[in-house]
Amino acid sequence: MKKYFLISFITLGLLVSTGIFAVGGGGGGGVTSCTEDIWDCTGWSQCSSDGNQTRVCSMTFDCSAMDTPKPPENASCTPPNPMPPLEIIPPGCAKDVWTCGDWSASCDASGREYKTCKLSFDCPNTQTPPPLALRPCSKVQCGNKENLRDRIYCRLNLTPAGLARDLELKYLPEACRAEEGYEQKECIDRYKSFQPCWNVKEGVERFSCAKNVLKLAPLVSEEAKLCQGKQGDEQVACKDDLKEKVLYMIVFRFYDLETRAEALAGRGADLNTIADFETIIELKKQEFYKATNNIERLNIILDVRKAWQDFVNTVKNQII
């Protein structure tokens, strides 16, 4: 009996020391019950690439009078920055690799065409320049359009560089299109010979330049007198040559009106209005070349004069 009592006393002491039962002090004392289960959890795992971390929780003391929820074993977290993929370097590379698309189907207003190139492989320790991605246009932009006005309007929308490139690819003045063979070549050569004159101040100086190109005397009457002083076939040839020079000079004046109209585009004149005017002049040039007598030629000159007056009246409120 004494032995049993001693064992019970020791057991009670252990229970008190572990906190399962508490011995109250003063006022006679008493025993209180437990208040919660006890859980023991491991540390959180490393954050995964999808932003989750875990741990394991085990109950170390089950309070019979309570039901304490198990602590969370999963939690969201901020994943670490991914490691960059290892760069695989081909053995012995000597240059970067560029991949390019096709050249653009159309050219810009400055007569250039483009293609896009991307660096597809960057060889370490080298600096390979990208391929040429810009070049002069390889196709005619305006000269191949079927309609006269469309060709004119197209050229009006080109920059000087773009127009120069288009004419470089195909130089065929509108007035020469109606000609064929030798006559067309002669017409083209005549237009080319006038090119330096467009860099001369408009007016008297420009017309003097054209006369020098044609080898036409400052006064036509002076050259006519020279022809009168000749005899027979020589006189006929002289008069025919003078007549041709005068006719070319008149056409040059038509041409000059077109360049003056184009100059007004820079001051706000509508391009469609300019294109309409130039279309009329180009058609009148063709009529002038085909005219067989001076009456027809005079009527064409009067038509051109009226077209210029109408054009000026139309754009005078547009220009600044």
Image (tube, grey):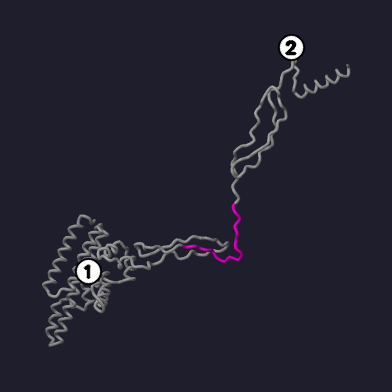
Give residue 20's position: percent from left, percent from top. 74, 22
Residue ID at (15%, 66%): 303
| 2 lies above or below 83 | above
Quadrant for residue 242, please give it: bottom left
Task: Name the one closer to the observer, 155 or 20.
Answer: 20
Q: Quadrant of the N terminus?
A: top right
Q: Residues within 10 Å of mark 1 (few under 14, many from 20)?
A: some
Give left or right: position of 237 versus 19: left
Q: Quadrant of the C terminus?
A: bottom left
Residue ID at (66%, 40%): 45
Estimate the spatial distance between the alpha carbons at disc 2 and disc 1, rounded to whole Å: 128 Å
Quadrant for residue 53, please give it: top right
Instruction: Say which label, 2 or 1, has the lower sequence index.
Output: 2
Q: What residue is disc 1 on?
A: 255
Q: Residues within 10 Å of mark 2 (few under 14, many from 20)?
A: few
Outermost residue, top direction? 27
Q: What residue is disc 2 on?
A: 27
Give residue 302's position: percent from left, percent from top. 13, 67
Residue range corresponding to the magenta coloring: 84-100
Q: Secondary structure at mark 2?
A: loop
Is most of the magenta stretch helix, strand or loop? loop
Task: Look at the image and say whether residue 91 sits in the magenta stretch.
Answer: yes
Look at label 2 and name its amino acid.
Gly
Look at label 1 and name its amino acid.
Tyr
| 169 lies above or below 33 | below
